[in-house]
Every structure is written in structure tokens, then in C-alpha cells.
Image (cartoon, coloured by chain):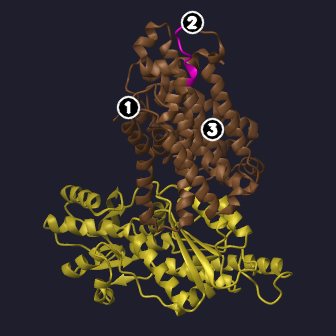
Amino acid sequence: MTAAEPLPRGVPPLYGPVQARRNRGLYGLYAVVLAFLVIDAVLFPGLLSRDGFARLTQNWFPLALAGMAQALVMLAGGISLSLGAMVSLGAVIAAVTMSGPAGVGGGLALVLAAGLAIGAATGLIVVRLRLPAIVVTLAASFLIGGTALLILPRPGGAIPDGFSDLLAGDQPIAFGILVVIVGLWKLYLATPLGLSLYAAGENPVAAHNAGIAVDRVRIAAYALSGLLSTAAGLFVAAQTGSGDPVIGDSFTLNSIAAAVLGGVGFLGGSGTMRGALAGSLLLSLMINVMFFLGLPPVAQYVAQGLIIIAAVALPQLRIRGRRS
Amino acid sequence: MIRSSLRAAAVPVCLGLALALGATAPALAAAKCIKGDRKAPFTIGWANIYSVPTWMKQTQATIQAEFDADKKRGLVSKLVVTDAQGNASTQIQQIQSMIDANVDAILIEAGSSTALNRVIASACAKGIAVVNFDSLVDTDQLTTRINTDSAAWGAGAAQWLIDAIGGKGNIIILNGPAGVSVSDDRRKGAEPVLQAHPDVKILAESNTAYNVAPAQEAVTNLLFNNAQIDGVLALAGPLATGAVLAFEKQGHPVVPTTGENARQFLELWKKDGMKGWATMQPNWLGALALDAALTALQGKDVPAFVKVPLPVIDNSNLDQYLAHADAFPADGFIYSPYDQTLFDTLLAAK
């Protein structure tokens, strides 16, 4: 722990206060997520069984990855409008390769490699050509979405049953994978690339002057974001047992909603991955809770809007209250 | 022809099913997914992909009406409705919630022809009656699927139009969006009929969204470029409405036009005294789906696929439809009447 090392006199430890400050805006969200978990468990006690927990986390998993992918790009000072198309592409590649000669292993490698490569290429264009991320990723969304439609013009393809059952069966394996991914993210934050991410996103000029390879940091963020997006697509394909070339479309907006709910800022360098994860969990839980409350669809639209506004506004109100 | 071959295909499937279930249900052949352990009153889940379009609202109303009637008879207790807001992943989660809530039947308007297959199979394995209608899935791990025939729609419209213009002349074809299966299937159905009549010349063809304005714009352009148009093969209601409005605005006499049971189109048709033909995707497919689920839950067999014949509107029965137009929304669809006898006939058909 950095905080435990001896520091020069008069300099307070940084890690604790920084994390606390980042968490401050999130307590409201954590409280809402916790409340929703409790409500969901009360309305549907089966949630607490292994099977119920497995289903809950499986429904959350793809949006969790998409939310992390979006948060990564946003932390680096960008935004991705091609994320949904990447999810579709991942699903389509998995569905056409895994039941073919490539097999599960080959398909997995192809999906992840495609995500990494396309993500890196997008990042390269945005960063090196100094183009706005919103324009580049909008264009990329047509390119990538079109490619998915070329590979699989109509819903079809297949994922081997064994692989589907493994990822989306009765065991909470998806949750285990998510825990591993979060662990890897913590490790990444300890590497030079990860350490510089916040600085490069918040103030690229100052970061450059401080000796950070800003371009490389940002391109790496796009590449990892691509990897997470196609991995989300792979999971959706496993969950549904097949590929659908437009299944990812809704992930673009939902991933932005998850990240923003989780306190990730549009201007780069502010926000946390745990926030984005909590945001995505809230969006996923909301569907269950509204179902078990038995609200009619029209009321669901309204309730959804109110909950999102409440989760974002609560911490702001508290901070203001404290200041005045 | 197509119908009889489908029925022929359904017979061995049902026979096999009956044999497979013979050990557990000796008296009656049960429908697929039904285990016979669920008792009335039943709880029903209705998993809609998107509830906002007028067609969906009217369909929802037929389900609600059927449900209310069944509730009076003590057959059902609760109807849960979900709206996936166009998102197939959300729909999976909502169907999963219905399974968790242990509903007795799930009605599905699918947001993807493949994505729901696994969750549908798991509902079926739990003995839940799963009925899919209108927008279909490509699995057979469910109780039944219900729809009209898009190819027959296209073929019927093309045949009527060709007859209406005397077997020769210039026509334009208005399609729905490219890459949408309903739109493709209707157009494919029209193709062999058009091929068989070389004297009918296709001047132009358009793909637009299922909305009046873009279709009207497309037809206005076609009218500028083509002097003589003898007929309009519009393969959906809003497209036909757009076509008629374009002819009116440009001061052209309205030509024979095919369309759908959209109230606006039928009223224009009457007002202009034109020659017309229309069919429909009846909104009562929703009520029929609920009826099929309840039939299956009560231990009776239902066909694995229910093909609903297309009701036809032409100049001879247009007034019957318009007579009760006020009972339908101005931007809605005037669907054909339905009753329990019709449903019984459709569900008994094998």
C-alpha cells in the first residue's frame, strides 16, 4: 500500500483520500443498487439460490462488460458510438466460427483478436489524426455493423451447446469471469499504461509535459475497450445459442447510460470502473424489479427515467447541502 | 397448396409427439411443453418487443379483451405485460423473469428470430405453454407459432392488381424497408405472379420505411418521371396511403392500388371511389395466441404451426369494414371480426 510507505513530512497520503473522493458521488448509486437488490430478492426469493444468482449475473454480464468498455474510452477522453456494432460483430464471429472447424478455442481467439485489432485501429485514427471520437466511432459503427451483416445477413449460426451451458447455464461462471476481469483491471491500473490513463484523459497536454506517452495510453484504452465489447458479444451469442447481426445495437446507448450513471464524466479522466459496473447492474436490476412489481409498460418507461435521474441527482443534492 | 403441405408436415410431428407423451398422458395427446401439472386459474405473461406502434396497441387490446372474458369464466387470474423497448437482450431477461415468476403461459412477439431460442426452450422445459405470434422465432421448442403467410400476401396482391388492369400495363411496386424479412417475403411472394405476366411492366420499385410520408415522396418522384402508371402494387398499408395521397396531390386520377387494412387507406379508397384490394395482419392474432395457450394448458393438443388465412378487403366488402371504422383509432387498423368459433376452427386445423 502506498499509504503505508513513509512519506515526506507534511505530505498527507494520497491513495485513500483520492479513492474516497471518487466514491463520494457514488454513495447514492450504491444505495439505490443495494435497495434494488433487496427488493428483487424480496419479490423473487429464488434470486438467492445458486441458479437464481447465476441467471441474474448472466443477464447483467454483457452490459457490465459494455459499461466497462465505454468507461475505458470515456476515461481516456473519448466516447464510443461503435460499441454496439462491436457487440454484434463479436456475436456474429462467434456464431459462425465456433461450430465450424475453428472450434470454441479458435472462435474465442478470433473474437478477441478482432475486438483488440478494431479497437486499436479506431483509437489510432482518433488519436493520431486528432479527429473527434464521436465522429470516428459513428463512422466506424456503420463499417463494423455492415461487416457483421455481411458475415451473417440474417440471424443464424450456432454456438455449441456445451459452451453455451458452461457460460450461461446453472452455474454462476459468468460472475466468476467478471470477478477475474475486475481483478485484471486493478492490475492494469498498476501498469504504466493504466497509471497514466486518468492523467491522459483529464489533461493530455499536462500529462504529455509530465512525460506520459499520452497517445499510446489512449490507443491502448480503445483497444481494450474493443476487446471487452466483442467479448460481450461472444457472451450474448453463447447466452442465445446463436448469432444476430443487430443484437448489439442497444448496447451503445445503454453502455453510455451505465457509465454516466456510474459517475464517468464526458470530459475524460473522471469516474471509476466500479461506478460503471454499479450503473450497469442498476440498469439490469431495474428490468427485473419492474417486472416483479407488475408495472404496466407505460409506467415502466416513466419509472425508469425517474430512477436514473434520482440515482444521478441524489449525490449532487448531498454535496450541495454540505457546501451551503 | 402450401397450406396442405404444411399440414401434412405437421401430422407426423404431432403423431410423434403423441407417441412420446403416450406414457405420461395416456388419455389425450397434449400439446408441446405441456406436462399437465398446471391448473386453472392460469397466470399469463405477454412478452412484447415494443409496445408503442398503433398496431401493437390494438393487438394488446385484443389480448386484454380475451383475458377479461376468460377471467370471468375463472380460467385466468393474472396478466403480466412487458415491453422490451426493441431490445432483444431485454426481452430475454423479461421472459426469464416470467419463468422465475412461474407463469403458466408466455405469449411472445419476438425481437429476434434466433436470440430467444434458449430462453424459450427453458420455459418449455418447465411446462410453460409458450406461444409465439406475428414476429416468429425459428425454434420448434415451443407450444405453437401463429402467423399469416407473407408470400401469399404478395402473391394475392399481385394477382388482383394484374387482373384489375386487364393483364397488361405499367405498374410501380412499393416495398417496406430492405433487409426486413416481412418486406422481403411479401415481395418474393409477388415475384412468380409478376413473372407469369410479361405484359405487365414494372416501371420502378421503391423501398421505404412503413410510414406514409416517405412513401408519398417516393411516389411523387415516380409520377414526375413516368407519364403512364396503370397500377400501384403497395405491399403495406402506409405505403398505399402514401401512394394515393401522391396521386391526389399531383392531380392524377387514382389508379388501382393494393394495400392493407389501415383505416386511413380504406377511407381514401372510399372517398376516391377507386379500385382497391387490401389484406391484413389481423390484430386478433394476439387474442388467438392467448386462446391457443389456454387450449394447450387445458390438455388439448394444438398444431405446432397455426397458419391464419389472410382476410381480403375489396370493393365488394369495403363498406362492411368502414361501417364500424369509428371503433378503431384514426391511425389504426380496421381488422376483421373474430369469435371463439373462428379460433376453434383455426386451432383444430391440422
Q: Residues within 10 Å of mark 3 (few under 14, many from 20)?
A: many
Q: Amino acid at mark 1?
A: Val
Chain designation of label 1: A
Q: Amino acid at mark 2?
A: Pro
Q: Are marks 3 and 1 on the same chain?
A: yes
- Magenta span covers which residues? A9-16
Q: Earlier in the sequence, mark 2 or mark 1?
A: 2
Task: Read off the residue under disc 1.
Answer: A135
- Residue A304 magenta-highlighted: no
Q: Secondary structure at mark 3?
A: helix
Would you identify the image quadrant in which residue A233 lies? top right
Verify CB contact (< 8 Å) between mark 2 and mark 3.
no
Disc number at residue A231? 3
Quarter placement of the N terminus of chain A? top right
Q: Residues within 10 Å of mark 2 (few under 14, many from 20)?
A: few
Q: Position of residue A69 (x, y in %)?
A: 54, 34
Cα gap from disc 2 to disc 1, whole angstroms:
46 Å
Residue at x 45% of width, y 13% of height = A207
Report the magenta stretch's main SS. loop
Q: Earlier in the sequence, mark 3 or mark 1?
A: 1
Cα gap from disc 3 to disc 1, whole angstroms:
24 Å
Q: Amino acid at mark 3?
A: Ala
Q: Are marks 2 and 3 on the same chain?
A: yes
